[in-house]
Structures are given as C-alpha cells and as structure tokens.
Image (cartoon, rainbow, N blue to C red):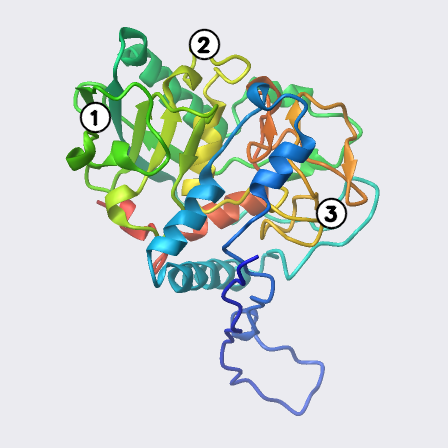
Amino acid sequence: MKKAFLSMATLALFFTACNDDIQAPVQEQQIDMSDFYVYTDIQTDLTSKFTENKNQNRTCYTMNNLNRLLDENPGLEKRMYDIEYQTRKFIATKGKPSNGGGKPDNNTGDTDVNVEPISGSLIKIPVHVNVLYNTNDQNVSTQQIVDQITVLNIDFNNQNTNISKLPGDSTFANDVADTDIEFTFDPLTDITRKYTDVSAWSTNDDMKKSSRGGIDPTSPETTMNIWICNMGGGILGYAQFPGGPLSTDGIVLLYSSLPGGTAAPYNEGRTATHEVGHYLNLRHIWGDGRCRQDDFVADTPSSDRPNYRCPSYPTVHCQTADMTMNYMDYTNDSCMYMFTDGQSNRMRAIFQEGGARASMIGN
C-alpha cells in the first residue's frame, strides 16, 4: 500500500510552571496525526470479500476516486494532511475528543468515548444540480431533485423517522447528532440540464467538464455541485474530499438513486447523504482498512469491513458492535439513519475560519 504522508505536526508548547499538576491549555497540546492516511488499496478487496452478490450491494467509488486524484495531483496529499490537522486542531480547541490515534477495544458496542457536539450557528450550503441525460428516464424530474434536497435536510438535521429503529439496548442513542447543516436550493435557478450522447459515464470526472461533454461546476468555491447521470459498473455515486481540484469539486449520483428512482433498495436518497458526508470530510465508518485503520471519529466503533442490506443488531467485528445504521456504512437506504456527534464536529470543522470549505458560508 502506498504510504500516507505521516510527518508529525505539533503546536508550540509555551506554558511552563513549577506545579506539575497544572495542565497546558487544550489548544496548545500536541495534535496527534500518527494515524493519518490518504491512499487506500483495500477497497476492492473488501467489496469482493464480504459481498454475497456484488450487483445487489451499495457501491461507492469515493476512495477509488481519491486514489486517482492523489496520483494525478502532486500536492493533494499535503493539502489533505493540512485539512486534517486543522480539523483536529479545531476539535481539540473546543475540548472535544477526536480519534486520538485509535479507539478502545471492547465487545459491548460502546466506544467508551462520549463526544459532545460543538455548538454553533446554522451552516447553510448552497446547492447547484447538474443533470446529464441520454434517455427520458435519466432526465430526472424537478420534483425528484427537490425531494432529494429534502432528504439531505432531513438526514443532516436528525429528522429521519427511521431513527426509531435504533436498538433500545445499544449505546448508540447517546451518539445521534443533529449537524445543524442546511442545504439551500431554488429549483427555478439551481438546475442545469443537458442532453448527452453518452449512455453511461465512467468515474474519471468527465461529466464535470463541458470539454468532455459534461457540465462545468457552478461557483464551486461557494456552492456544492451535484451531478446526476447514468454510471456503469453498478456504481451509485462518488464524491470529492475537501482539498481536491475546484474544477471537479462536488458529488456524482446515479440518476436512479434519487427518491422514487428504480435502484431499490438504494432509491430513497441516502446515496446522496452518504456522498455528501464524504464531501464534508467523512470517511467510511470502517476506515477502509482493518481494525486499526480509523475513520478519524472517536464515537464510531472500530470495524474491518462494510455492512450490507439490513444487518441484525449486534453485528460484531473488531470486538465491537458495528454502527450499521450510520450513513457512512453500506446498508440499505431504509436501514441507515444517523450521524454521530463526532462526525458532526468533524464536518462543522471545515467551515470554521481557515477550514477547507469556509468560503461556502457567509456569502
């Protein structure tokens, strides 16, 4: 596996005292980056090893896309390191735990970390939707797009009624987050449609380039762009992490994954929720690796694989019960219904001063 950029970054320690019991302020303590990684080479192995029928399981291409962008863009690895450092520094400054270089192992389903949400003002993210169609069914209706934005606002504000399915004996109830993130959208002005001769797009970002027959992004510095189109290979969608090229920034969705689409059981709009999570700097909940490769979130359990369909609780891997209902796993749309406080803190961090997406708010 290609080695991640692992150089240590620290904050200067200026505080000294003769009383050993006095602690330095949190923001002046060391920021642990020892577990940071960018490249993954296990995504395909995990999908093939743990999938009963590949064509019936959720396929997100985000990590594969990240590997490609890292190869094509010298300096992206360093930019992502700096973004991660800023994220951890912000969380530490607020006195909240991040992953801290790993999670405790136990078999109770509890990570033994109680993460408190970082409060702040409502974050509003403008959205522009780009529709590329070759057939009438690919030209999704305006109502479907409106319904998709509604699903995003439901999910990011803890209004998914499926939260009632949360197991009563699990500890995850204490982790459910309202991210206080809202997606703003005007169906009269925020949709661009284009007919294309391309019957199915690949994952090389051509749909984001007018020179390749696609649609260029609209104001990516201040607007989240969504491309809706047909993709081959059973791929439901993919996203670009913060730090990537502005010319391709945004998320891509299979047209039939929108609410009311034909990609059941992935047609309730949760593919968009999952991919927007990546766009806002969340990794897959299992960390795209084995038990000790983390998703950088303290209150999500360690796991070594994705989960599919609607698993029973508890589903145990790495001596912990998996949080299969998390939006960043691979379960059916109807069986994912929560973000955690730690994930919320991580997403909100990129909108703070100096954050990778700070330019999106306050405009």
Does residue 236 lie above or below 176 as drawn?
above
Marker disc for residue 250:
none
Residue 29 appears in the rendering:
yes
115, 203: nearer the viewer = 203
Sequence-wise, the earlier of marks 1 and 3 is 3
Residue at 40% in and 38% down: 239
Residue at 21% in and 26% down: 190
Label 3: element kind = loop
Residue 324 location, quadrant: top right
Q: How many marks?
A: 3
Does residue 187 lie above or below 121 as drawn?
above
| Residue that carries the numbered disc 2 in the rendered image | 262
| Residue that carries the numbered disc 3 in the rendered image | 111
- Give amino acid for label 1: Asp
Sequence-wise, the earlier of marks 1 and 2 is 1
226, 215: nearer the viewer = 215
- Give amino acid for label 3: Thr
Task: Kindly check if marks 3 and 2 are in contact, taking CB atoms under 8 A apart as contact.
Answer: no
In x, y percent, where is residue 334?
Answer: 58, 17
Badge 1 crowding class, 10 Å Cα cut-off, few under 14, some 14 to 19, many 20 or more, is some
Label 2: element kind = loop
- Give amino acid for label 2: Thr
Alpha carbon distance from label 1 to label 2: 24 Å
Does residue 360 lie above or below 151 as drawn?
below
The N terminus lies in which quarter of the figure? Answer: bottom right
| Residue that carries the numbered disc 1 in the rendered image | 190
